[in-house]
Image (cartoon, rainbow, N blue to C red):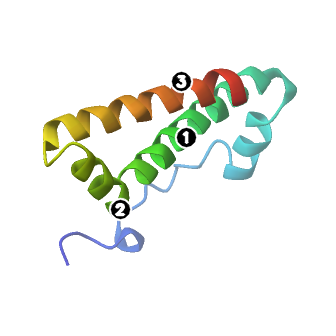
Amino acid sequence: MLGDNISSLPIAPNTKAKITDLETLYNLFQPKNKEVITQTFSAFKLSLLAGILFLIFSLPFINKLADSYFQGNIILSKLILTICVTVFFFIIDKFVL
């Protein structure tokens, strides 16, 4: 084991948690924090979209198809796949989400 077990670490006797995790979640989802939650989920949605597009365009059969279409020019095929991911990301972000 590389470090100490967290349950064996010393705790100062006068230290108390100021708010619990449940209170944090309750405060986070209050109407006054709606804008923060919306921005967070929007950013997560875009990250998830980018990851899915990357996954789709990284599939082996798509790479083989692109490599065979460009006669083995790997740099050109990767460049075209990158442009495709960028265009699809833009279209989905602007017109679908």
Q: Is residue 18 above or below residue 61?
A: above
Q: Please state if 16 lies on the left or on the right of 9 as rendered.
A: right
Q: Please state if 54 lies on the left or on the right of 74 as rendered.
A: right
Disc 1: which residue: 49
Identify the amino acid type marked 2. Phe
Q: Is residue 66 above or below residue 90?
A: below
Measured in 3D between alpha carbons, the distance from the residue under mark 2 to the one under mark 1, in whole angstroms, is 21 Å
Observer able to see residue 37: yes
Question: Label 3 near label 2: C-beta < 8 Å?
Answer: no
Q: Residue at x 45, y 52 (%)?
A: 56
Residue occupying the far right of the picture: 31
Instruction: Say whether disc 2 or disc 1 marks the residue closer to the N-terminus.
Output: 1
Is 77 or 38 nearer to us in this picture?
Answer: 77
- Check residue 70 in the rendering and tell me which mark sits there, or answer none: none
> Residue 36: x and y, percent?
68, 24
Please identify, in this view, whether the residue under mark 1 or under mark 3 is nearer the observer.
3
Measured in 3D between alpha carbons, the distance from the residue under mark 1 to the one under mark 3, in whole angstroms, is 10 Å
Is 13 or 79 nearer to us in this picture?
Answer: 79
Is 55 or 39 nearer to us in this picture?
Answer: 55
Instruction: Say whether disc 2 or disc 3 marks the residue closer to the N-terminus.
Output: 2
Identify the amino acid type marked 1. Leu
Instruction: Say whether disc 1 or disc 3 marks the residue closer to the N-terminus.
Output: 1
Disc 2: which residue: 61
Q: Residue at x 20, y 79 (%)?
A: 1
The quadrant holding residue 86 is top left
The quadrant holding residue 61 is bottom left
Label 1 secondary element: helix
Disc 3: which residue: 90
> Residue 29: x and y, percent?
79, 36
